[in-house]
Image (spheres, grey):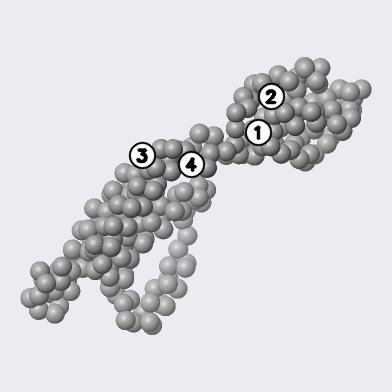
Amino acid sequence: MEILFQINGSQSTYLMSLLAMVITTILSIIITKVYQLTFTGERYSQNFVHTIVIMSVVVSVIMKVVSGNAGVAFGLFAVFSLIRFRSAVTDAKDIAYIFFGLSVGMTSGLYQFDLAILLTAFSCLIFYFLHKYNYGKGKDTQILKVTVPENLNHENLLDDIFNQFTISHTLRQVETTNLGTMILYTYAIRSKNDVNDKDLLDRIRERNANLKVSLTYLENQN
């Protein structure tokens, strides 16, 4: 593509940088469209979408600035190391999209436009198919709290239920409640994929004299 801009040295550089920014903008918009399509978190942020586009474009220019100049590169990286997101990125997939956008910006900034387009197309397909077919699906760790009457208190009370409904279970905490007449057990469990939460809770309620049982998800379930 550089053949299109063989006018003079500086003008060619400006035109190529402009072309890099335009292509990066288009590709980053495609990336954010796929992000919106595959988003499954609890809190969607328009600002995060804008951040992906802006950071990608900025990096495409920075790559031209730092190319061949190690001193400038180290200086810029030192500045970027001071930058922090105002809100913590809690979803690992969001971090992947940020890195995806930056990679496209870096590739375009080096005028490897064909590689940037290929990277965008291939990675977007991967993100989409992983989302479409729910690859790697599995229930996240849950916090199960079971209240048991003091007279029913024994360590193996729920073992057979756990063996039937869970992949793993770990006792995290034992405490007395209701003036010592009740025992509150806290477990970290991972349910089997085909287990219905209500069925698990109903079986436990049959065993703990129908006292309070709660199940909390550590992350959003899809």
Q: Which residue is mark 1?
A: 191
In the rendered image of this protein, does residue 84 appear above or below residue 34? below
First in sequence: mark 1 vs mark 2 = 1
Using the numbered discs, state the Cα–Cα distance from disc 2 to disc 3 in whole angstroms.
33 Å
x%, y% of residue 149? Answer: 86, 22
Q: Which residue is mark 4?
A: 135
Helix, strand or loop at label 2? It is helix
> For the residue marked with disc 3, what is the amino acid?
Leu
Helix, strand or loop at label 4? It is loop
> For the residue marked with disc 1, what is the amino acid?
Ser
Using the numbered discs, state the Cα–Cα distance from disc 1 to disc 3 in whole angstroms.
28 Å
Residue 37 disc label: 3
Front: mark 4 or 3: 4
Residue 44 makes an appearance in the image: no
Q: Which residue is mark 2?
A: 200
Using the numbered discs, state the Cα–Cα distance from disc 4 to disc 2 in whole angstroms.
25 Å
First in sequence: mark 2 vs mark 3 = 3
Using the numbered discs, state the Cα–Cα distance from disc 1 to disc 2 in whole angstroms.
9 Å
> For the residue marked with disc 2, what is the amino acid?
Leu
Q: Residue at x 76, y 27 (%)?
A: 161
Q: 33 or 130: which is nearer to us?
A: 130
Q: 61 or 179: which is nearer to us?
A: 61
